[in-house]
């Protein structure tokens, strides 16, 4: 079967490629190349499954002919043995129970404890859960409030009192309601609609100074986030806000940023608590002359202690992911720990029977943050969780581990611990503790793959003591507790509910198939700057190529996939991958997708190797502007490179394009004018104008076209000849236009077309010909 696959899909090779510098045992081969596969042929599902690690039940079906997309083939990492035989890496793994044939010497004998230790080390390298930066040279934002005017800074008491008159008492969320309770939150606020920041330097400073500093301290990639103004807050003496977590106020929000503007105050200490860590931010001593920028993740508990004197004025921002980009990710500043590779490979070999040790069927790792079902996916994890997942994905993919995210629930029922005063007073559930657990129930309430796709029908038994790290789930304070109260002869019943977001790791791919999902693969390829593909990037390429062919993938996702592949191919100087990516586009959209990459491709490879795909793209594209623009760029490049072959090819293709022009559009006029500069007056007179007349272009188009001709007439040819063409053409258009009511029938009169009349007037004025203007205004037959 392997031999048959190689014959059917692998490209023909005359010599072996040199080994990659970072992987001397591997040679990169390709699946079906456009020149070796029939237009409507499709790789088998088995072949697709062998080239990308997937669950046996999750192999995407290739697109059918109805989608008008052709098979692109799969980019396959291959291994070459000493005899020159080529094996698919994943096929070889399937054929041999031991993923590594040679047992490790220094292997882990306690997978659970060693994995716990190494993952905890990974978590320590992540960024802080908050940020605190101060600036003595920050610009004045030019703060202005509707009904108040510009607010002077540092804030004075008269200004503060003037502002308070236009403020409202701040509310807060309690369950499903928004309530007003000054014992919990005593703060003045102004809605962002009434707040204006008049100094343009403020936005620049926020974007280039404040936000990058926050991102650096919290170890978040600054290129992927924005800060959106939410409220103006004013604290006076006694103002405070008890400990709380921020809600997600807008799509993609993951943190809060507060800019405390210069204003003298005492008190107002910010206390932050997260996963057992507590930090305090006290900026009162420098509050008068400095601007302070504070930030924290939304699920961090934080409180603002009472203001003792003065006023604290602050701008509150929502920090969120950019809509057009992926979820912000923490920067990977350290390489993957050698210990993580050692533990995971030990687990892999033991699961395959290569090492003589007992290993768990799975490991459940409790995440630091809690996530809603909507955010339970790789792109939504944050802080240490995101860093840890990014560390795990490459090694899990290489070793074919299952890697999933889930909601876990533990329900404990038992008896409350009795005290001497147990029967003399009533207790709430949070005032008693569990003495003995009679029964507990554990379950996964929701399991998803890395892209957030739910895995249904998975029923797993969980051993809280041997499979859960870093500590059993029933530790610490439960999310919910119910106490039945103490009775006469027995202790009171107590119930605990624990809810956690967790990672699931499993070495058995038939239970949890590793899936490097399309969205993750695209992001990785787009962000990579490698000069040759790593093993994970090879897998990502295969996944992305398959996504271009699969049902259920949107047009936007396909466009993003093709863009990622084209960029990667150019960076790796990989011609065949570039051709595979280009051929993955529908023919009528291909030129639009590849146009920005063609020149760079021509710099890297001989044009003859790109000639076929360029000709096909020009033939099927429906845009005059895109086709002419590409040919103009290539013609200029041929002059720069002194490439006569490319120059002659451009001339031939220009003739074909001009003989098959589509309906012209106003935004294509610049492209037409560039051709006119090379072809001259006769081209305009004998080719373009007859073509435009054939398509019955409207007066707005003619006006724009003639205006552009007049603007560039010195670069096109004889001014007198062009003026004559403009005059004759305008007169002809005026004579053929019917914008006035017809008087043919006394009982019926057509409506006057004011829009067409305005277009004619603009056209005539553009021509500058008085005779044409007289023709337009002649009463005979018109008024």
Image (tube, rainbow, N blue to C red):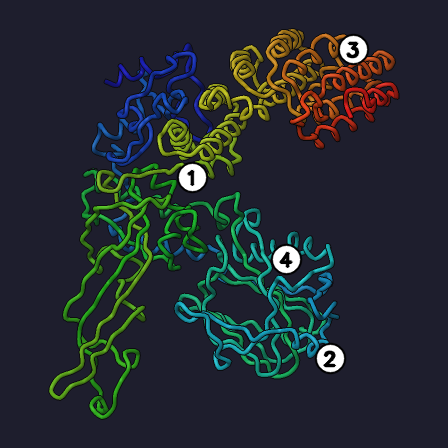
Q: Nearer the viewer, residue 548 or 502?
A: 548
Q: CA separation, marks 2 and 3?
A: 73 Å
C-alpha separation, residue under disc 4 versus residue under disc 1: 30 Å
Quarter location, residue 704: top right
Q: Are marks 2 and 4 in contact (CB under 8 Å)?
A: no
Which label lies toward us, 2 or 4?
2
The vertical placement of 292 against 520, above or below, is: below
Judge whether residue 30 can be spotted in this image.
no
Q: Secondary structure at mark 3?
A: helix
Q: Which mark is residue 681?
A: 3
Of the 4 image quadrants, the one containing the C terminus is: top right
The secondary element bearing badge 4 is classed as helix
Q: Residue furthest bottom?
A: 424
In the rendered image, the residue lying farthest to the front is 747
Between the residue at mark 3 and the residue at mark 4, the CA separation in whole angstroms equals: 57 Å
Q: Which residue is mark 2?
A: 158
């Amino acid at each position: 079967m392997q031999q048959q696959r190689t014959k059917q899909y692998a490209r023909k090779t005359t010599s072996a490629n040199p080994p990659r510098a970072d992987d001397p045992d591997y040679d990169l081969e390709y699946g079906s190349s456009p020149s070796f596969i029939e237009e409507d042929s499709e790789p088998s599902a088995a072949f697709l499954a062998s080239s990308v690690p997937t669950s046996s039940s999750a192999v995407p079906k290739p697109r059918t002919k109805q989608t008008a997309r052709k098979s692109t083939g799969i980019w396959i990492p291959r291994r070459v043995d000493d005899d020159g035989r080529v094996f698919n890496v994943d096929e070889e793994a399937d054929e041999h129970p031991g993923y590594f044939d040679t047992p490790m010497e220094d292997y882990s004998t306690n997978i659970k404890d060693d994995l716990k230790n190494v993952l905890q080390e990974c978590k320590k390298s992540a960024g802080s859960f908050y940020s605190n930066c101060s600036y003595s040279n920050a610009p004045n934002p030019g703060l202005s409030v509707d009904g108040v005017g510009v607010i002077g800074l540092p804030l004075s008491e008269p200004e503060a009192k003037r502002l308070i008159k236009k403020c409202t008492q701040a509310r807060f969320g309690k369950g499903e309601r928004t309530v007003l309770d000054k014992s919990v939150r005593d703060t003045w606020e102004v809605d962002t609609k009434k707040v204006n920041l008049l100094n343009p330097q403020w936005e620049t400073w926020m974007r280039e100074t404040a936000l990058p500093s926050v991102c650096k301290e919290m170890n978040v990639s600054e290129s992927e986030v924005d800060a959106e103004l939410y409220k103006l807050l004013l604290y006076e003496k006694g103002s405070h806000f008890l400990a709380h977590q921020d809600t997600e106020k807008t799509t993609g929000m993951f943190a809060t940023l507060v800019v405390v503007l210069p204003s003298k105050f005492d008190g107002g200490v910010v206390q932050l608590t997260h996963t057992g860590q507590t930090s305090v931010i006290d900026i009162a001593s420098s509050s008068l002359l400095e601007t302070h920028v504070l930030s924290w993740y939304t699920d961090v508990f934080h409180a603002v202690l009472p203001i003792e004197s003065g006023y604290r004025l602050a701008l509150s921002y929502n920090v969120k992911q950019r809509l057009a980009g992926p979820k912000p990710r923490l920067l990977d500043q350290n390489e993957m720990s050698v210990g993580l590779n050692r533990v995971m490979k030990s687990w892999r070999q033991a699961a395959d029977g290569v090492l003589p040790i007992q290993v768990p069927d799975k490991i459940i790792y409790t995440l630091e943050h809690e996530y809603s079902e909507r955010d339970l996916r790789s792109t939504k994890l944050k802080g240490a969780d995101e860093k840890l997942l990014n560390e795990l994905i490459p090694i899990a993919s290489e070793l074919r581990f299952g890697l999933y995210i889930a909601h876990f629930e533990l329900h404990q029922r038992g008896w409350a611990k009795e005290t001497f005063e147990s029967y003399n007073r009533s207790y709430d559930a949070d005032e008693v503790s569990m003495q003995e657990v009679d029964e507990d129930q554990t379950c996964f309430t929701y399991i998803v793959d890395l892209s957030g796709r739910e895995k249904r029908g998975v029923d797993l038994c969980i051993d809280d003591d041997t499979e859960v790290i870093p500590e059993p789930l029933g530790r610490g304070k439960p999310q919910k507790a119910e106490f039945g109260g103490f009775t006469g002869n027995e202790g009171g019943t107590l119930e605990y509910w624990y809810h956690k977001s967790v990672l699931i790791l499993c070495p058995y791919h038939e239970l949890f198939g590793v899936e490097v999902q399309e969205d993750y693969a695209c992001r990785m390829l787009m962000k990579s700057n490698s000069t040759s593909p790593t093993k994970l990037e090879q897998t990502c390429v295969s996944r992305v190529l398959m996504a271009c062919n699969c049902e259920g993938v949107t047009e936007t996702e396909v466009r993003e996939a093709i863009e990622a592949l084209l960029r990667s191919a150019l960076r790796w100087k990989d011609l065949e991958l570039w051709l595979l990516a280009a051929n993955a586009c529908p023919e009528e959209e291909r030129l639009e997708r590849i146009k920005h990459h063609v020149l760079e491709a021509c710099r890297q490879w001989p044009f003859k190797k790109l000639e076929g795909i360029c000709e096909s793209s020009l033939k099927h594209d429906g845009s005059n502007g895109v086709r002419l623009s590409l040919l103009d760029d290539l013609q200029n490049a041929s002059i720069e490179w002194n490439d006569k072959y490319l120059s002659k090819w451009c001339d031939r293709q220009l003739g074909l394009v001009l003989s098959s022009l589509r309906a012209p559009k106003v935004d294509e006029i610049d492209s037409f004018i560039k051709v006119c500069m090379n072809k001259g007056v006769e081209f305009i007179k004998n080719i373009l104008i007859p073509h435009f007349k054939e398509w019955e272009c409207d007066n707005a188009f003619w006006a724009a076209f003639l205006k552009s001709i007049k603007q560039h007439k010195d670069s096109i040819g004889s001014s007198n000849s062009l003026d004559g063409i403009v005059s004759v053409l305008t007169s002809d258009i005026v004579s053929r236009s019917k914008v006035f009511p017809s008087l043919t029938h006394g009982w019926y009169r057509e409506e006057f077309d004011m829009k067409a009349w305005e277009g004619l007037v603009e056209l005539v004025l553009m021509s500058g010909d008085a005779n044409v203007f007289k023709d337009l205004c002649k009463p005979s037959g018109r008024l």
